[in-house]
Each structure stands twice: as C-alpha cells, then as structure tokens.
Amino acid sequence: MGEGQPFKLFFKPELESSPLVVAWNQDAGRVGPKVADYLNNELASREFAEITPESFFALSGVSVEDDIAQFPESKFYCCRGKSLVIFRSDVPRYEWYEFLSLVLDIAEKYCKVKEIYTVGGMVSPGAHTTPRMLLSVTNSTEMKPMLRQYDLISDMDYETQDGQRPTFSSFLLWAAKRRNIAGISLWVPVPFYLLAVEDPWACKKVMEFFDRRFDLNINFASIDDEIARQDREIAQVRSQVPELDNYISKLESNLGLTVDESEKLVKELEEWLRGRH
C-alpha cells in the first residue's frame, strides 16, 4: 500500500467465505495468542497483511519483556489449505471503532469473511484439575443451533453493564453484526494461579472446537506434551510443599482461599513452574 495507508498488504490471499479467528495479546492466561500461534504453526500460515500502529497505539511507552522491546503488532495470517484467516493483535490504545472497522474491511475485502470467532481466557477461582469449559456468546441467534453440536456452553447472553465500556471482543461482535457478519466470542476459564504461566489445557479446549468446526486435522501432540509436563510439575510441587497442596485441595473441594493464601499460591507456584527453585 502507499505511504500513509493504515495497513500493509504483502499479498492478496485467494480465499472465499473464510472464517476469521481473532486473538488479542492482552488476554487472561494468554489463551488467545497461544491458540493463534499453535494454529499458525500447525497450518503453515502465511502473514499477508499488517495494520500499522501509528494511529492506534502509544509508541512512546513500548513495554519490555525478557529484555526485548515489545512493539504493538496487528497481523493477519491465511491458511490456504483450510481457507482460514487468523488475526493476532494487541488491543489498540486509541480509535477503537476505526481500528475494528479496518479489521473488518481487510477481512471482507481480501478474504470474503462471513464468520468471526474471538478467543480469550477468563479468570477462574477453580483448581487446575477441574475440566475446562468452553463458553460462547454470539451476535446472531441463527448461530446458536450450530453451536449446540459442539462441546461448549451456548445458551449465554451477555450485555455490557450500563456505564461500563464493552470488552474489545464484544465491540468487534457489535461492529460485525452491523455488516451482517456472524460473530462468536469463545472463552475458557483459566485457574487464577496459572494466569502468569499459561494454561495449555485451556488452549487445547479452544483448538478442539476449531478442529471439529473447520475439519483442520490438528496434531495435538505438542500441546498434550505441555499439558502432561505441567501436570507433573504441579504434582511435584504438591508433594514437596504441603502448604500449597492444602490450598489446591481446598479449591478442589470448592472452598475459597483468603487473599493471603491466594497470593502465596500464585507467587510460589509461578516460581516453581518457571524453574526458580
């Protein structure tokens, strides 16, 4: 695109009626970006477009993670073999409506997108041994019968509270509905003490839905290895630190923790799982 354009197009994907999967980097437990990355790797996706950040992000306060500057990114990927489009992005600081309109413009013009799926995690007070649930909200009543075919909760209706700003995914579904594009938000509850170290079980729950919905034939071997490794590590922590085992046992019995107990569980478990002991 020419100078001053709000996005760069690297090539035009030849896609028809493609579903769009949207993941925001600022997500509880990093469920969305991890799902996007796994799909991109499994399906050998190619980046075909990028929204330029100048109009939507504050570039003066770039964050640093592991000694690497984290510049805001908003990138589109296409999987030609499966006719799937993936958008992985930071949540913009400014001009929400203009940003979402641009996302929809690109998706419609270059990919003929007819369905949008947002992916996210939500904080859960439960234990990691509790089976993950997949929750959904749609902007189209016509989509609900389709969703009942899958292992998810589809009878939810969500409205933003008066006086509150809508979530970015809710805003996207609203904007999509104005264009007669069906939209679905998918959420998985993530145990609060896994938010900082990721929850591979939550990611697999979402990917299982996409695998069935779009016939992707995903190989789950690597995510299964992650799940098994994390389960072993937490079991080891529980065997060596009775206090943390007691906290998790309370959660497994649907008993709440005090603020101090919750904070200690989060801090110490994160240290163990990050290999600091």
Image (cartoon, rainbow, N blue to C red):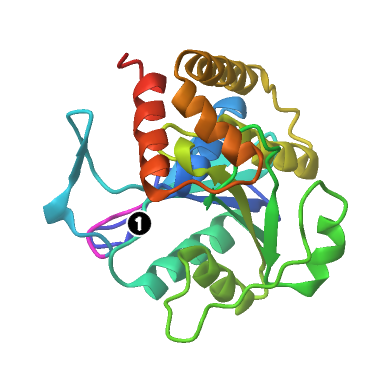
> For the view shown, which residue lies furthest in the bottom direction?
162
Magenta stretch holds residue 269: no
Instruction: Tell me the quarter of the image containing the C terminus.
Output: top left
- Residue at 28% across / 64% down in the picture? 93
Towards the viewer: 30 or 83 = 30
Residue 52 in magenta stretch: yes
Residue 211 rendering spot, x and y as whole percentages: 74, 37
Left or right: where 265 falls relative to 234: left
Q: Which residue is mark 1?
A: 7
Which quadrant of the structure image shows residue 51? Answer: bottom left
* Label 1 residue SS: strand
Determine whether 56 is above or below 24 in the image.
below
User: Which image quadrant: the N terminus?
Assistant: bottom left
Q: Residue at x 77, y 61 (%)?
A: 154
Residue at (76%, 56%) from the top-left corner?
153
x and y, in percent, of residue 32 in the image: 51, 45
Q: Residues within 10 Å of mark 1 (few under 14, many from 20)?
A: some
Nearer the observer, 161 or 100: 161
Identify the main secondary structure in magenta. loop
| Relative height, residue 86 to residue 105 (above, below) | above
Q: In terms of image quadrants, where is residue 157?
A: bottom right
Q: Is residue 127 visible?
A: no
Q: Position of residue 175 (x, y in %)?
A: 54, 74
What residue lies at 70% left-to-right and 46% top-to-bottom?
133
Expressed as whole percent of the image width and height from the top left, the position of residue 264 reads 36, 36
Q: Exactly how many numbered labels are in the figure?
A: 1
Amino acid type of the residue that numbered disc 1 sits on in the rendered structure: Phe
Describe residue 239's horizontal placement relative to residue 138 as left or right.
left
Residue numbers of the magenta segment = 51-55
Q: Can residue 247 be seen here? A: yes
- Front residue of 77/275: it is 275
- Res 267 → quadrant: top left
